[in-house]
Image (tube, rainbow, N blue to C red):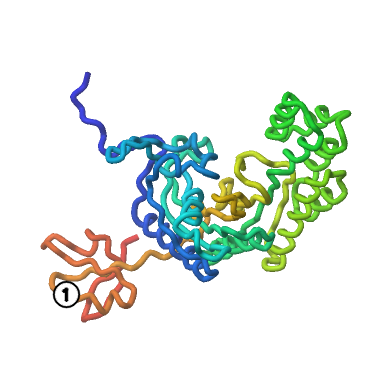
Amino acid sequence: MTDDLPNPALLPAGLADLLPPEAEREAGLVEAMMGVFAAHGYERVKPPLLEFEDSLLAGSGAAVAEQTFRLMDPVSQRMMGLRADTTPQVARIAATRLGGQARPLRLCYAGQVLRVRGTQLAPSRQLPQAGVELIGGAAPAADAEVAIVAVEALAAIGVTNVSLDVTLPTMVPALMEAAGVSPALRSSLAHALDRKDSAAVTALVQGQPGALASLPGLMAATGPADGALAALDAADLPPVARAIAQNAATVLAAIRARAPGLRITLDPVEFRGFRYHTGVAFTLFGAGMSGELARGGRYVSQNDEPATGMTLYPDAVLRAAPATVPRPRLFLPAGADGAAFRAQGFATVAALAPEDTPQRLRCTHELKDGAAVPILTKD
C-alpha cells in the first residue's frame, strides 16, 4: 500500500493533451479546411457527443458498434453511446431534422470522437475529425466531388503532395457470390486477400469458375489506376462485378477531369475495414507518411438514401502540414493599450505583477517608443 496520490498528469491509455502551440495550430487547420467545405456549398452541422444507443448505432453506425463507449442516461434510464464516428450522426440528422430538404444535401462537420481501442499504428482513442457528407446523390460525380473537396481542403493548408488510394470493397463479395463459393472457401479467400498472399489466392481459386479465376490477375494489377482499370476491363467479370468496375472507371474519370495532376492508385480486391461501404472507397495519403490523412467513400444512409463522404483526420494532417510561423507575442506594460497591435496580428500579453517580464511571459516583442520591437535572444 502507498499513500502517494496518482500523478495528476497521468491519462488513460490512448488519450493525450494537445499543448500550445500545436492545439491552436490544429484548430486553425480545421477551420481552414471547413472554409473550403463551405466554399463548395457544404453546410455545417454540430451533432452532440452523446446519443441514445439505438439511434447512434443505426445504419452505418453498426460498423463502429464495437468501438463505442456506452453508459446509462440517469435522466431517461436509456443506454447512450459516445460517438466513435461522426458520419452516422450526420446521416441521422439528414434523415430526420433535415428530412424535408431537397436532395442532394451537402453537410460538413468538425469534432472529436472517442473509441474503445486504438490500433498499433494509431493508438489514440480520442480523435479529431472534419469531413463532408453528400446525401441523396447517387451519381458517380458525387463520389468524385467529395474526393476533390478533400484534396482541395488539404491543399488549402499546404498539404499538396498527396495520393488517392481507391478501393472497391464490393468487388470481392460480388465475385464470390457469382461463383457460389462455400462458406469455408469464402473465409479462406478473405484471409488470404487480407494478407495479400497471392500464392494462396492462386491455389484457392484453382479450378474455380471464371469469376474467381480473375482474382490473382486483379491482385497483380494493384497500383497506378490506369493499369488496374485495364486489368478490370480485360477480366472475365460477371455482370454485377462488371458494373462495379465501370462505375469505378467513371468516378476516376470525373476525378481526373478536375484534378489531372493527382496521383491515383486502385486496388480492386481490397475490402478490409470498409464494412458499410457500398461502392468506391477512398483513402488519402501524404508523401512519406504511413498514416491516413482522410478516408471515405460510398455508403447507404438512413432511409436507404444513397450517400458518399470523406472524413479528414486533423491529427494526421497536423503532422503533414508545413510548419507555420507562431503568432508574435507583444509584452504590454501594466496599463498599456494593445488594441492597435492586436489589429496588426499580435497577441498582446499584459503584465499583471511587478515580476512579469517579456522573457518570463515568453514574448517575442516589447513596446519601445510606442512601437513593437523584436526581442533579441542570446545564442
Mark 1: secondary structure: loop
Q: Report x, y in % for residue 26.
A: 42, 57
Looking at the rendering, in which quadrant would you find the N terminus? top left
Residue visible at 69% across and 33% down in the picture: 195
Answer with left or right where residue 214 lies relative to residue 22.
right
Residue nearest the viewer, comparing 78 with 100:
100
Hey, what amino acid is under mark 1?
Answer: Ala
Is residue 47 depicted above or below 342 in this figure? Answer: above
Query: Outermost residue, left direction?
Result: 354
Answer with left or right where residue 230 lies relative to residue 299.
right
Residue 140, by quadrant, is bottom right
Residue 285 appears in the figure: no
Answer with left or right where residue 171 lies relative to residue 156.
right
Q: Report x, y in % for residue 127.
A: 44, 47
Residue 138 appears in the figure: yes
Residue visible at 46% across and 50% down in the picture: 89
Residue 75, by quadrant, is top left
Query: Outermost residue, top direction?
Result: 1
Residue visible at 73% across and 24% down in the picture: 184
Residue visible at 47% across and 67% down in the picture: 35
Please tell me how many numbered marks the rendered image carries. Answer: 1
Residue nearest the viewer, comparing 166 with 245:
245
Q: Report x, y in % for residue 65.
A: 49, 37
Query: Outermost residue, front direction?
Result: 100
Residue nearest the viewer, comparing 379 with 118:
118
Looking at the rendering, in which quadrant would you find the C terminus? bottom left
Residue nearest the viewer, comparing 216 with 297:
297
Q: Residue under circle 1?
A: 336
Is residue 376 depicted above or below 219 in this figure? Answer: below
